[in-house]
Image (cartoon, rainbow, N blue to C red):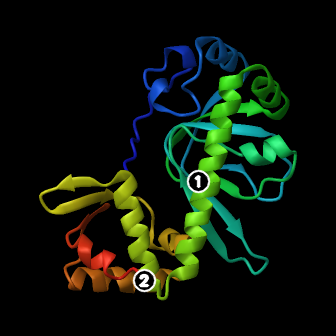
């Protein structure tokens, strides 16, 4: 889960060198020029709340650099991280389009660059630019599929160890790097945040990771986790 802290601010989306690599931003020049006229670019420090679950939608945030955690909370105060958003994602799109309260809260996990677009401007943008509308639909569809996978993972996992194994394997598939030691993951989440992703406690995550290390399934060096025995993790997954 790589995460550059050196933010190179792109105030002009047309000149952004990585725009073509991101699903939403890879639009026609005409659409991007319009986008530049309606967005507000800002740098947000770690721990910034972009929006809060239950509040009326003000608009959307496009994540240009950094990472954002999306969380939901119960009335008892228990928090679950439903997703860690990566660069290129549009945050708050479903609430903004439907005109209903944000279904999750969004908080930066590290210094992040964001483009904010007001709700009325975003809706008009989607209505006038077909590629922007299609790319938003693609992201919402991807979000739906991801949610289904998470429900399946949490619902079918028999033990917390299996849930954590599934999470590590998911990370290895999306952002793992092959090395001589095994698949390398850059994990900047705390044990508390990992626990919030799989619905358990910080103490349980710490205990299971320690067990994985003792069994030489993983190796931990700072924020790097090496999956030294990927097959052992896969063997924990029930079919």
Please state the horizontal and vertical placement of residue 159, each as a whole percent of the image: 47, 88
Q: Residues within 10 Å of mark 2 (few under 14, many from 20)?
A: few
Q: Which mark is residue 238?
A: 2
Please state the horizontal and vertical placement of residue 62, each as a whole percent of the image: 62, 36
Q: Which mark is residue 47?
A: 1
Mark 2 or 1, nearer chain start: 1
Asked if residue 206 is positioned above or below residue 52 in the image, the reply reads below
Q: Secondary structure at mark 1?
A: loop
Q: Nearer the viewer, residue 66 or 35?
A: 35
127 left or right, relative to 68 = right
Q: Nearer the viewer, residue 58 or 181?
A: 181
215 left or right, relative to 144 = left
28 left or right, relative to 77 = left
Q: Residue at x 39, y 60 (%)?
A: 171
Residue 12 visible in the picture: no
Q: Residue at x 24, y 60 (%)?
A: 183
Q: CA distance from mark 2 to mark 1?
A: 36 Å
Front disc: 2 or 1? 2
Residue 126 visible in the picture: yes
Please state the horizontal and vertical placement of residue 212, each as a whole percent of the image: 28, 81
**Among the 4 quarters of the image, the one containing residue 70:** bottom right
């Amino acid at each position: 889960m790589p995460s550059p802290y050196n933010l190179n601010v792109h105030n002009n989306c047309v000149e952004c060198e990585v725009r073509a690599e991101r699903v939403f931003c890879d639009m026609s020049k005409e659409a991007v020029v319009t986008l530049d006229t309606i967005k507000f670019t800002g740098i947000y420090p770690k721990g910034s709340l972009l929006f809060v679950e239950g509040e009326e939608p003000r608009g959307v945030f496009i994540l240009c650099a950094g990472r954002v955690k999306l969380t939901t909370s119960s009335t008892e105060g228990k928090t679950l991280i439903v997703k860690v958003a990566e660069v290129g994602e549009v945050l708050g799109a479903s609430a903004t389009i439907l005109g209903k309260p944000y279904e999750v809260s969004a908080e930066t996990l590290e210094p992040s660059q964001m483009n904010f677009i007001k709700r009325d401007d975003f809706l008009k943008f989607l209505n006038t630019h077909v590629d922007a509308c299609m790319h938003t639909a693609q992201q919402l569809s991807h979000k739906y599929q991801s949610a289904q996978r998470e429900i399946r993972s949490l619902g079918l996992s028999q033990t917390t160890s299996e849930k954590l194994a599934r999470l590590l394997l998911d990370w290895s598939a999306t952002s793992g790097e092959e090395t001589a030691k095994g698949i390398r993951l850059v994990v900047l989440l705390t044990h508390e945040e990992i626990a919030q992703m799989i619905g358990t406690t910080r103490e349980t995550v710490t205990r299971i990771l320690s067990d994985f290390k003792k069994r030489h399934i993983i190796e931990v060096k700072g924020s790097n986790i090496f999956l030294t025995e990927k097959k052992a993790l896969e063997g924990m997954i029930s079919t």
